[in-house]
Amino acid sequence: MTEKSHQYTRAKAIVQQIEQLAAITEQSGCVTRRYGSPAFVEGAHLVAQWMQEAGLQTRIDAIGNVRGRLVSLNPHAKTLVMASHIDTVVNAGKYDGPLGLLMGIDVAKQIGQSTILLPFHIEIIAFADEEGVRFHTTFLGSQVVTGAFNPQLLAKQDADGITLQQAMSVFGGTAADLPNEAIPANDWLGYFEMHIEQGPVLDNRNLPVAWVSDIAGQKRILVHLTGFAGHAGTVPMSMRQDALCAAAEMVVAIEKFALQQPNLVATVGTLQIPQSASNVIPGNVHFSIDLRSNEPDLLANAYQQLQQLCTHIAQSRNIACNWQLVQHTAPVAAHAPFTQLLQQAIAQAGFPDVSLVSGAGHDAVPVSQVAPIAMLFIRCYKGISHHPAESCNENDIAAALQVADNFLHLLIQQHT
Ligand code: HGY
Ligand code: MN
Ligand code: MN
């Protein structure tokens, strides 16, 4: 079997696993696997089984990351981590996260089954909470592995009042275990993540892969508006403190502001009206703002200007506005020469040297604080993501496996 046809066979097997994992969901008919849910736990155990079948020393850690190691004979060797996440957004696609993870398991399996003497350990990690849907956090799993986890997050509650500490107990983990789950800073050789592009550039340029030059910074904000609930039939329009109308004016103003900024995106993805009824003037509204740019100053200025804009709109409507920054991650650049080796691997596979900025966040962001990172993007159908139509074809996955195999062999050569 030629190397190319072998990579294609491997790609087909990965697509079958993607479908198998996607069938494990909180909601039948769509893919939803939020951190710590029974579906998440079932999916984690299936991934653990696949890691074991790939010959990796496997365990589920205290926060719920699934971890599989291919150990070098050199006990003092550093560790290369290949990872991605297995939690999803609500009504998600099947590939965002699982594709990169399953490709990492496959690449490690090929090396484990070869006669290569591994000069470094390889650790494959299925991160437990990259999306941050349940607790409005992100990167919980990767922050534990990098030692950056903030224990104050353990008290965060989900929509049902369950704390993160209670949620993680489903993995048998306790807060005291978390510091021991970190890979010490000087043990890292590097971090390599493969991920669908989640954007249209590769599809438009008819390319299977690209390397990632930067990952955009992001700020997640929760806005709580308090007006005054009232009778929809009796309160004159001029006397209302309608929290929803205030929110609506803010949402449109946020969109208008972002449309005028060339390198900024702003999204109001969630909006809730607690205790709503059709004949009640909304007294309370909560909504989220997701703000991103790969330019730190632009992101900071936009944050300030939008906060002023919303405060002004609230004051003009006699509405109280509580503005809460729930998460901030600075923009991150991939690290040379680690990424230069990935560029070499892409060239060896015969693909052009194309790099992209990632508008999406990835676990590579927290990892970049402790290790050199390299990310490989894989074309996805029309760039669709965070949507059930998200998909990727076997040829592109096979092309990415070819690059990943090259990258690992270059790293092994470099450290032998
Ligand atoms: O939102 C993101 O950028 C990623 O999908 N967590
Ligand atoms: Mn995502
Ligand atoms: Mn992702």
Image (cartoon, rainbow, N blue to C red):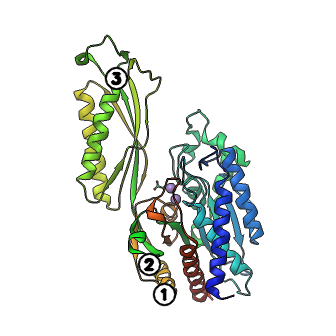
Q: Amino acid at mark 3?
A: Gly
The residue located at (55%, 78%) in the rendering is 399
Query: Is label 2's Cβ within 8 Å of ligand 3?
Result: no
Q: Which mark is residue 227?
A: 3
Give the side of residue 276 with respect to residue 164, left or right.
left
Looking at the rendered image, the disc whose residue lies closer to the viewer, 2 or 1, is 1
Res 120 quadrant in image: bottom right
Q: Answer with left or right where residue 236 lies relative to residue 213.
A: left
The image shows residue 302 at horizontal and vertical percentages of: 28, 50
Residue highlighted by disc 2: 336
Q: Write the residue at 61% across / 46% down.
A: 29
Who is closer to the viewer here, 245 or 76?
Answer: 245
Disc 2 to disc 1, how far (Cα)? 21 Å
Which marked residue is nearer to the observer: mark 3 or mark 2?
Answer: 3
> Any mark on residue 350, and which?
1
- In the displayed structure, would residue 23 be above or below residue 357? above
Amino acid type at mark 2: Ala
Q: Nearer the viewer, residue 16 or 276?
A: 16
Instruction: From the top left corner, tell me how far across and down residue 33 is, in percent.
Output: 61, 49
Ranked by sequence position, the earlier of labels 2 and 1 is 2
Residue density around tag 3, few if under 14, some if 14–19, many if 20 or more, within 10 Å: many
Instruction: Please say whether residue 120 is visible from this viewpoint.
Output: yes
- Disc 1: residue Cβ within 8 A of ligand 3's nearest atom: no
Quadrant where the C terminus sits is bottom right
